Image (cartoon, grey):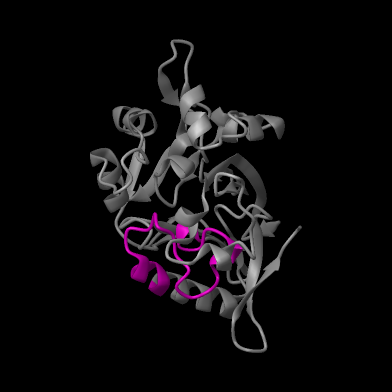
Amino acid sequence: MQIGGYSIRLLEGGRFWLDGGGMFGVVPRTMWQERIQPDGQNRIRLSCTCVLVEGHGRRVLIESGTGDKWNDKDAGIYGIEDRGGILASLRAGGIDPASINAVFCSHLHFDHGGGLTTLGADSRPRLSFPNARVYVQRREWQDATANLSHMRTTYRPENIAPLAEAGVVVPLDGAADVLPGIRVEPAPGHTLGSQAIFVGDDQGTLCFIGDVLPTRFHLRPYWTMAYDVQPMTVNETRAKLVARAIAGQWVVVLPHDPLGHAGRVRQDEKGRWAWEAVGE
């Protein structure tokens, strides 16, 4: 895609498996399994979508996926399929990770910030993108460094500590135009400090919406995750963003959709939200 003077490429940052009940919260399995079938352990296969943005003399990455630092035990727990993560995807596309100038993360759970670090020759975590600044909301950075989460292992030290030691994180306070054509806005609910990331201009917009809308299956009102810190806030944030996406005909990038990465949200004849895939 070409948006706002940027060339856009969607990349895979890792495939993994999570409990279907966790992904759909209070929604009964009899309802959500009509849309996506779980495996024998009640898990569903998920994607970690990343976005490479090139233009205006910059090379920017949105999200970093699960990363490549998994041991056998943890890889088995989360069903990590490809331990190469975003670094393997970038190199397969001929992109040197050292050429990335900036990384934007919606939040810093392991499936979004895990690729920010990689293991060095000494088997210690180091920066995956040594020449990049990392942009997150200040509240998210505070919660990540303090490991304030109702999921004990989701802010993993090996992902967070090297960023703090290197001083590469730029904490943002609310909505901000960070780079030409790249903007962030708070999108709270999944975490208190989550943000949505926008690329574009008055001719078109791409929105990485974050985990307020992890998959197309969450386009139904009140379908939230058990992993959400504030489920009702997720509904409010999602409703506002989706209304704007429909009005502006945004390209919306979903973080975890197993069937595809990007699309547009429409309203059907009954006024319900419907997904229209792009590039599938």
What is the magenta range?
209-236
Work out whether 140 lies above or below 84: below
Q: Is residue 158 visible?
A: yes
Question: At x 55% / y 70%, what residue is drawn?
Answer: 219
Classify the position of the C terminus by image quarter. bottom right
Above/below status of 17 relative to 237: above
Looking at the picture, tell me which residue is in the foreground, 142 or 175. 142
Name the residue at 52% across, 41% down: 65
Magenta-span inclusion, residue 223: yes
In the picture, the quarter occupied by the N terminus is bottom right
Q: Is residue 97 magenta?
A: no
238 versus 256 height, above or below: below
Which residue is found at the position 48% from the left and 34% from the top? 77
Q: Nearer the viewer, residue 269 or 72?
A: 72
Q: Is residue 140 left or right of residue 98?
A: left
The image position of residue 89, as x and y in percent, is 65, 35
Single out the residue that lies furthest toward the top.
122
